[in-house]
Amino acid sequence: MTEKLEPALISATDAAVRVEGGARLIDVRSEKGRSAAGALPGADIVDRDRLEETFAGVSRDQPVVVVCGSVNGSGPVADWLVGNGFVDVAHVDGGFPAWKDSGLPVGEPAEPAAG
């Protein structure tokens, strides 16, 4: 019987250690969420509706860390990655707010558009 792989739910500080060690950091928050809360320096912005297209041809062996506004957004993406052959996937418990609250680097929120 084959054991089903599941993505790890990890702390923001553990995620930062993984990224420092070579994991690909992906941010799956909406543009509105990123603009309001701030950016994740070095993260690849990934549209949750285009996962198949985004990860086509990408090595399944590179570790991946997924961040969203909460585990409600990152969890399904992390599950999708594992289900599509990625072998080392984690997502951040508490999402971007936990990352920011841990004192990890974040970019400033964008200024609201003049309107």
Image (cartoon, helix red, strand yellow):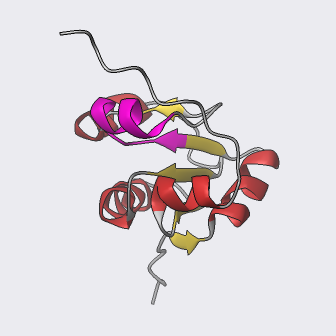
Report the side of 21 relative to 9 (left or right).
right
Q: Residue at position x 42%, y 59% from top?
A: 78
Q: Residue at position x 52%, y 33% from top?
A: 39
- Where residue 15 sits, quadrant-wise, is bottom right
Report the side of 16 relative to 92 (left or right).
right
What segment is highlighted magenta in the picture? 26-38
Is 58 magenta? The answer is: no
| Residue 80 vs residue 99, the one in the foreground | 99
Q: Position of residue 44 (x, y in %)?
A: 53, 31
Q: Residue at position x 28%, y 32% from top?
A: 32
The N terminus, quarter of image: bottom left
Image: 104 above or below 36:
below
Image: 88 above or below 111:
below
Q: Position of residue 28 (x, y in %)?
A: 39, 42
Q: Position of residue 51 (x, y in %)?
A: 32, 39
The C terminus, quarter of image: top left
Q: Pick out the residue farthest to the right.
A: 21
- Where residue 12 sits, quadrant-wise, is bottom right
Q: Pick out the residue farthest to the bottom.
A: 1
* Total labels drawn: 0
Q: Pick out the residue farthest to the front.
A: 115
Q: Residue at position x 38%, y 29% from top?
A: 35
| Residue 65 vs residue 67, the one in the foreground | 67
Q: Position of residue 90 (x, y in %)?
A: 55, 63
| Residue 21 vs residue 4, the one in the foreground | 21
Report the side of 111 relative to 108 (left or right).
left
